[in-house]
Every structure is written in structure tokens, then in C-alpha cells.
Amino acid sequence: MTSSIQSPADAINAALTALGSMDRIGNLYDGSIISKKALDIYGQTRDALMIDGDWEFLERNVNSVLLKQAPMVYLSPWTSQYPPQPWIYEYAYPADALKIRSVKPTAVFVPNFDPQPWPYSVDNDNNFTPAQRVILTNVPSAIIVYTGRVTDPTTWDADFTEEFIIELAKKLAPGLKGLDVEKILIPEQGQAKQIAKSNQE
């Protein structure tokens, strides 16, 4: 099943197949009732599954981007130019991160064969305009380990794709129950029948 998943529409169509439906969409924006319902749940379902699982293909290890650092000597009053206490370093939250897995120091000479967990906290720094999501820790030159958002289905692991299709089917099923088949196939532009037919050929 998963070898033919090249696009979001393929994943939705696979979910429809899993439900025993003969309906198909051309893409998430073809205007059909099914595509509209799928568009409402697609991204949220994908991201939730990526966050909840421990998928190796989503793991990212990146060098941190330092935003703020506490002074070496205590200064009073403590101002917003420093990270909130008791943290020493404030790093930027990676743009494609869905979940921070850990923070670790950069290996200087040899690999760390006995890694220990380092405390960290995810916060919103309202002193930026607009407010910026940040990572607070006491680890200098930290490596940020996180679960990244991957939107291209062709790069997903087969196990993830299979589970994603199942989740899509579960969420699509209630919305499709009791709908008239002709109404499902006919979008506002009147193109869905032709799209569904060409997609099956």
C-alpha cells in the first residue's frame, strides 16, 4: 500500500480504500466534500502522530542558536536581556520542530558513551516582537535533539505511513457516514467525478 504514497491525496485515497470506499480525490484542493473534510484533519493528524511516536526518521540533531546568555557575575536587577532564572542560556526553538526530545552538550574530543539527561525548559519569550518560542537550559553550545515536521510522504518510513493511513481512516469515517454518494463526488466546481475516474485509471 505505502509504495504508491507520493502525495497527500494518495494517503487520503488509501484511507478511503481502507474504509471500503470507492471514492477518490484528485488532490486536497479539488473542492469535493471529501477533500474539504480531509483538508481539515490532514495536517493535524500527521503532526499528532509524529509527536506521539518515537519515529527515528524524524529525529534531528542541530547546533543551537544562542539568543540570550546570563552574565558570569550576578547583576541586579535581573533584566529581560538575560534568560529567566535559573537558566543560563536561551536558544531559538527550531522552526521545523514539533517536539524537543533532549538537549545535550557538544562533544569536544571524543563521543560521549555515557550520555546523561540535561534539564531544559520550553518557554515563550514575550520580550521579542512577536513573541518567540525558546529553549532554556544550562548547557553551553548545546545540541538540540528534536522531532522534526516532515511533510513529504515520499520520505516517510513505511510503518509511519501505514499508521497515518489508519488514523486518517478513523477520522474520515464519521464525516462520511450517511452522506449521499453523488454529493461526495461533486465539488462546487463540478469536477470531482472526472477527477475520481481519472485517478482510478
Image: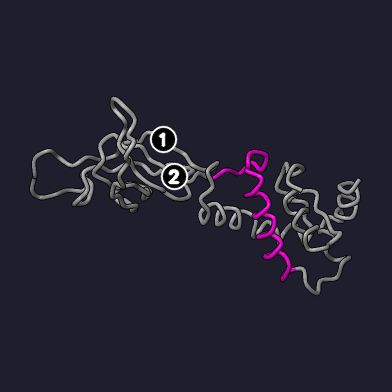
Q: Return the residue at label 1.
A: 62
Q: Mark 2: give few (<14), some (14-19) or many (20+) Cα within 10 Å.
A: many
Q: Is residue 190 above or below residue 153?
A: below
In reply to whether residue 162 is colored magenta, the answer given is yes
Residue 155 pos. (x, y %): 63, 39
Q: Position of residue 196 (x, y in %)?
A: 87, 52
Q: Earlier in the sequence, mark 1 or mark 2?
A: 1
Residue type (three-letter) at the residue carrying disc 1: Val
**Which residue is under mark 2?**
146
At 37% from the left edge and 46% from the top edge, which residue is drawn? 102
In terms of depth relative to the viewer, which is nearer, 33 or 123? 123
Residue range highlighted in magenta: 149-175
Residue at x 28% of width, y 43% of height? 90
Do the residues bearing badges 1 and 2 touch, measured as CB atoms within 8 Å? yes
59 above or below 30?
above
In this rendered view, identify the residue nearer to me: 162 or 9. 162
> Residue at left 81%, top 59%?
188
Give the overall secondary structure of the magenta segment: helix
In the visual, does 78 lie left or right of 198?
Answer: left
